[in-house]
Image (spheres, helix red, strand yellow):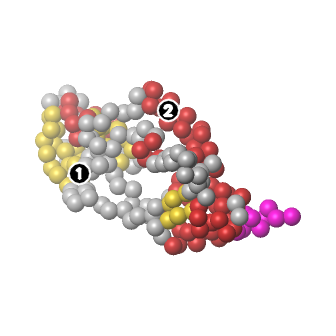
Amino acid sequence: DADSDSDLLVFLDFLAIPQRPFAEGQEERTPEEEDVFALALLHLDSVFLYADYLVHLDVPVEVPVDEGRVVHATVPCEDLELREVGRTLQCTGAFAFDSVSAVEGLPMLGSATAARRIMQGKQQVSVTLEKHKYGLPNCVPCSDRGWIYLERFITMVVAAMDKEEDFVDTVYSNKMEVLQEVHAGAQCLRQAAAP
């Protein structure tokens, strides 16, 4: 039971750790924020291992209206700042998070070098953009994401170190499947560690 005089601290990883830019006009993380991020990752296990309550939310990805809408435009070359993200050519600056599928009608296939060659010496170019107001959405279900599975595994370890009957008072989720997965994993770990 939590002592009524206890402090309640809530850790929301998305809010507590500096994220990469996700909205128009946001700057990249500063060197200081990079240091905070690295330090947070170094100690993230403590957040989970010493927590009294662990909550795992599993929500479906809601793709925003107009996500991926294709737009053809003529833009000044100086406004078209590009970076390669996997196989996607992503805009930074004026068209933050939009991806470029073609420049002057030529498919880009994720190559910033090819786009820059086409833009060289020009004031403006015609581009085909896919609009991604909040960046490319991660449509991978929560249960299939490696980072989330790691968080759940750490919860399994915490639950395995605790009494089995305390599970219902320490681990919470909005999805019964998540609770069952974590509970089953904790049971396996507890059995493996038994003499």
Determine contact: label 1, label 2, CB under 8 Å: no
Q: How crowded is mark 1: few (under 14 residues within 10 Å), some or many (20 or more)?
A: many
The amino acid type found where label 1 is placed reads Lys
Q: How crowded is mark 2: few (under 14 residues within 10 Å), some or many (20 or more)?
A: some
Q: Nearer the viewer, residue 109 or 180?
A: 180
The magenta stretch spans residue 168: no
Residue name at image x 41 percent, y 64 percent: 59
Q: Is residue 80 left or right of residue 162?
A: left
Residue 61 percent coordinates (x, y): 36, 62
Q: Nearer the viewer, residue 80 or 103?
A: 80
Q: Badge 2 is on which residue?
A: 36
Q: What element carries label 1?
A: loop
Taking 77 as reference, is 145 above or below it? below
The amino acid type found where label 2 is placed reads Val
Residue 32 percent coordinates (x, y): 45, 27
Residue name at image x 74 percent, y 64 percent: 190
Q: Is residue 185 left or right of residue 107?
A: right
> Quick one: quadrant of the C terminus?
bottom right
Quadrant of res 188? bottom right
Residue name at image x 55 percent, y 57 percent: 54
Q: Which of marks 1 and 2 is nearer the N terminus?
A: 2
Give the magenta range. 187-195
Is residue 172 among what the camera can see?
Answer: yes
Chief secondary structure of the magenta portion = helix
Q: Which of 71 and 126 is in front in this view?
A: 71
Query: How many labels sit on residues?
Result: 2
Q: Badge 1 is on which residue?
A: 131
Distance of mark 1 from mark 2, alpha carbons?
Answer: 31 Å
Is residue 144 among what the camera can see?
Answer: no
